[in-house]
């Protein structure tokens, strides 16, 4: 079956797995082609480096690299030629990849799929925060025949809070039932029961108590949904009634048969001092009157949670791909940062809590994320410099306390392990820990979907990799080797000479990183060491948890071999 994997074409992979998976596989092929160019260069560069007799290399890696060439050697011209071959081939392959991506991107966008016909609209002005008005706005621009529907997102934080509470009770009940089936005994809990005006702690059956709580929350969620729907209908009727009254010269607002409010123009300005741009801005039936045909508990809840109010974001679905693509590329409003258009994310990827964020909050979040990233970049330089110096004990003594340096110097057998440990630690920090930290920082930017969050995290990780691995790691060794040179203060240009003489020695360090990544990280992935260990721990530990709890409870999330993790790339 392995050979059949290579027979699938791009169209089949894109249809079944998505554009992201196809681009990932294409990136692997691009890296393979680049490696072939490097292998071709090594066939004639390694003999040129190894046959130099002037230097005596300390180890094999230094013997077959540019470290083995002395200053002013004519053989350095071959290194320049190899660089031109490598970068020229990379530019040519990138050109082919751009053409491939353009072609497949057009095929992807022309597929008959809801994502290609829908846009996500952010920062909708108040006068358009209504399904009919938002649809009418886009109909006036693209034509009514090109708009299928428009949906403005509603603020249902109160309902979400009740639903989350219901889910916790449901999981607790599920756990109690599972433990009863496993152990054969029912669990109990202690609750205060009202009896004759006194709250007396009483031991009760856990399953019965959780079942009763679940029934109450089910009723509460159902009732909240009904109230929100009634509120939306009443607000729409109020808007229509206000519009008719305004056209007839009156300014009264009717909220229904049982709840009627007559507000003059002065009262409207008092309730909404901002002088709304349209009737819909001022009409909030429940928030203005503070009365609902419900019990007192529900009145207080919905008065403060304001469930059912329109947010400043929504989705618009078109009937033609051309109109949808045009909407993505056109400015829809003359005011900056109003009616921002984005590609509609998949429903399961949406962060609903971030949908209604204002532009101010998003801008503050991005600014805070930027400063936190810069601070982390500076702080991350410290362990990077220390790890880079593991390859040279003399450099390591310059960046660590003297007593630790003396201890390492006395133990010669430990030094080769430190040389190997450096790349392992650097890979572990930059691949294992760094992406998680940067993902947490990216979350404060207010991303509305998992895709945009992953994109922002990938950008930061790439930036860190370039700066830390290819800049700090290279400059650190050179700076440590030459910072004690007093003549640099008299002749600053001497730092260029020091960098030129010490930077070539960093190639050995990069080769170590490649070897460690190839022979340690890749075998762990191929032999599925992490999934096997997780499955073993899930089967032999935490017996008080069900399999569902083991797979969903943070930070464990152990998976059985029959239910592996999703493709992590």
Image (tube, rainbow, N blue to C red):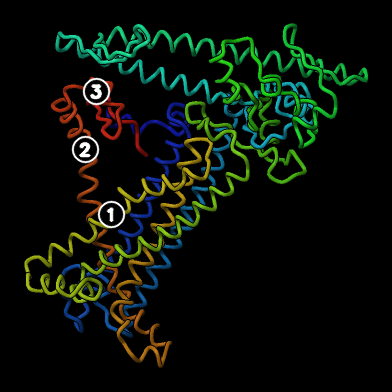
Q: Say few, some or many: other residues with alpha carbon within 10 Å of mark 2 (under 14 / 14 to 19 / 20 or more).
A: few
Place residue 440 in its image quadrant: top left
Place residue 225 in its image quadrant: top right
**Quadrant where the image shows the N terminus:** top left
Q: Could you give the CA–CA distance between mark 3 and mark 1, rounded to whole angstroms?
A: 30 Å
- Residue position for label 1: 427
Q: Could you give the CA–CA distance between mark 2 and mark 1, rounded to whole angstroms?
A: 17 Å
Q: Say few, some or many: other residues with alpha carbon within 10 Å of mark 1 (under 14 / 14 to 19 / 20 or more).
A: some
- Is 150 located above or below residue 103 in the figure? above
Which residue is depicted at the point 37% across and 84% down? 497
Which residue is depicted at the point 16% across and 68% down? 60
Residue 530's mark? Answer: 2
- Residue position for label 3: 562
Pick whichever of labels 3 and 1 is earlier in the sequence: 1
- Is 268 located above or below residue 432 in the figure? above
Q: Is the Cβ of the residue at disc 3 closer than 8 Å to that at disc 1? A: no
188 displayed left or right of 150: left
């Amino acid at each position: 079956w392995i050979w059949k994997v290579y027979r699938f074409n791009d169209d089949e992979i894109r249809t079944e797995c998505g554009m992201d998976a196809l681009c990932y596989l294409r990136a692997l092929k691009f890296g393979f082609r680049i490696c072939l160019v490097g292998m071709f260069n090594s066939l004639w560069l390694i003999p040129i480096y190894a046959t130099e007799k002037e230097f005596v290399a300390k180890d094999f890696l230094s013997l077959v690299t540019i470290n083995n060439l002395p200053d002013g050697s004519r053989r350095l011209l071959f290194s320049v030629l190899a660089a031109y071959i490598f970068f020229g081939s990379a530019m040519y392959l990138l050109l082919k990849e751009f053409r491939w991506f353009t072609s497949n991107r057009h095929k992807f966008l022309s597929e008959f799929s809801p994502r290609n016909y829908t846009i996500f609209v952010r920062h909708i002005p108040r006068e358009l925060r209504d399904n009919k008005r938002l649809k009418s706005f886009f109909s006036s621009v693209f034509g009514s025949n090109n708009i299928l529907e428009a949906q403005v997102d509603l603020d249902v934080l109160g309902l979400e809070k009740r639903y989350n509470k219901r889910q916790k009770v449901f999981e607790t009940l599920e756990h109690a039932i599972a433990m009863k089936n496993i152990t054969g005994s029912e669990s109990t809990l202690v609750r205060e029961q009202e009896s004759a005006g006194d709250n007396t702690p009483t031991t009760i059956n856990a399953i019965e108590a959780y079942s009763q709580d679940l029934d109450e929350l089910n009723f509460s969620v159902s009732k909240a949904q009904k109230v929100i729907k009634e509120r939306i209908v009443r607000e729409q009727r109020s808007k229509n009634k206000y519009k008719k009254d305004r056209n007839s010269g009156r300014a009264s607002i009717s909220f229904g048969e049982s709840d009627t409010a007559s507000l003059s123009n002065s009262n409207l300005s008092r309730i909404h001092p901002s002088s709304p741009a349209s009737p819909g801005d001022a009409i909030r039936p429940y928030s203005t009157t503070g009365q609902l045909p419900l019990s007192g508990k529900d009145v207080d809840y919905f008065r403060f949670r304001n469930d059912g109010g329109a947010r400043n974001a929504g989705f618009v679905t078109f009937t033609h791909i051309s109109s949808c693509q045009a909407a993505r590329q056109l400015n829809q409003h003359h005011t900056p940062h109003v009616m921002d258009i984005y590609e509609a994310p998949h429903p399961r990827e949406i962060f609903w809590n971030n949908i209604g964020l204002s532009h101010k909050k998003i801008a503050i979040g991005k600014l805070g994320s930027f400063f936190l990233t810069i601070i982390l970049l500076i702080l991350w330089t410290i362990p990077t410099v220390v790890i880079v110096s593991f390859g040279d004990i003399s450099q390591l003594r310059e960046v660590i306390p003297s007593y630790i340096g003396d201890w390492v110097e006395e133990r010669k057998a430990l030094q080769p392990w430190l040389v190997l440990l450096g790349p392992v630690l650097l890979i572990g920090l930059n691949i294992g820990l760094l992406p998680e930290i940067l993902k947490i920082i990216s979350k404060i930017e207010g991303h509305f979907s998992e895709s945009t969050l992953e994109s922002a995290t990938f950008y930061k990780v790439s930036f860190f990799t370039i700066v830390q691995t290819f800049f700090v790691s290279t400059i650190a060794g050179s700076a440590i080797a030459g910072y004690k040179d007093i003549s640099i203060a008299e002749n600053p240009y001497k730092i260029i000479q020091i960098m030129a003489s010490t930077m070539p020695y960093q190639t050995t360090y990069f080769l170590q990183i490649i070897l460690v990544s190839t022979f340690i990280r890749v075998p762990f992935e191929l032999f599925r060491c992490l999934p096997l260990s997780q499955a073993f721990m899930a089967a032999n530990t935490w017996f008080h948890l069900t399999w569902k709890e083991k797979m969903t409870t943070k930070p464990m999330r152990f998976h059985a071999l029959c239910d592996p993790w999703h493709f992590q790339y």
